[in-house]
Amino acid sequence: MLNLRGIHQRYADQPLLQDVRLHVAAGEIVALLGPSGSGKSTLLNIVAGLQVPDAGSVWFDGQDITQLPPEQRRFALMFQDFALFPHLNVADNVAFGLVEQGVPRSEARTRAVQMLGVFGLTELARRRVWNLSGGEQQRVALARALITQPRALLLDEPFSALDADLRVALRQEFRARIQAAGMATLLVTHDEAEARDMADRSVRLVQGCLIDAG
């Protein structure tokens, strides 16, 4: 379980996050709603370990990980721009996290092709990522996130760069795959429909405080 305890953060000498408390269970998807500038991405960065809060703590499975660096948290973070590596082909993009964990490159590539098969993307393994459609790129990004078996998945506006029809098509696919993997997932979005379609529950940042969004 992911557990945020009393997170406080200031920005430009103004309170941005105030006593934020949140529990996300294994296999649960929680949507974090709020307008631009409300602190959603800042909170996600704190959970990911990219930023240390001014006060409060981040816990996972009963361990305080507030000071733990990102690479030791075993969380996966997906951005709205996919963040794929243009100099690598599709299979090597998916294999990248395994190689970083010390898996031999040949084994990592084999496992990457197997993961691409799960997504129906085996035929794209040797393609360069710039030759893929937006939906294909996002599926590759999810495959890369899931192959390392992360303990939690952090999604930052994952579909905002895609057209409306593709966003709708991907929501339920992503929800099914995330729940099958059993990960605690925090979805940052400003899209109410996306939150309804993907999340088990939603919370909203209002003037730095977290409230139940129903």
Image (spheres, rainbow, N blue to C red):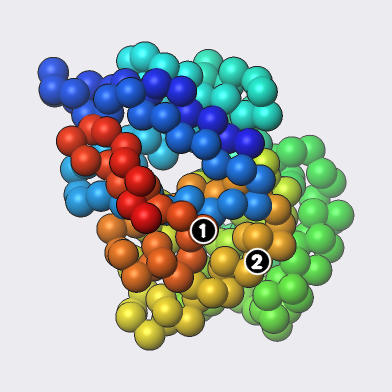
Q: Is 102 placed left or right of 62 in the picture?
A: right
Foreground of the two, 73 or 177? 177
Tell me the quadrant of the picture where the N terminus can be found: top right
From where the camera sits, is residue 76 visible?
A: no
| Image point (82%, 44%), residue name | 103
Image position, residue 174 (x, y; %): 56, 68
| Image point (86%, 54%), residue name | 107
The type of residue carrying mark 2 is Arg
Tell me the quadrant of the picture where the C terminus can be found: bottom left
Image position, residue 124 (x, y; %): 65, 79
| Image point (70%, 53%), residue name | 182
Residue occupied by mark 2: 177
Q: Is residue 46 above or below residue 121?
A: above
From where the camera sits, is residue 154 visible?
A: yes
Location of residue 91 (image quadrant): bottom right
Q: Is 211 placed left or right of 154 in the picture?
A: left
The circle on residue 200 is: 1
Image position, residue 152 (x, y; %): 61, 43
Pointers 2 and 1 in contact (CB under 8 A)?
A: no
Image position, residue 31 (x, y; %): 42, 53
The type of residue carrying mark 1 is Asp
In what element is the residue under mark 1? loop
Foreground of the two, 86 or 176? 176
Q: CA distance from mark 2 to mark 1?
A: 14 Å
Location of residue 89 (image quadrant): bottom right
Location of residue 94 (image quadrant): bottom right
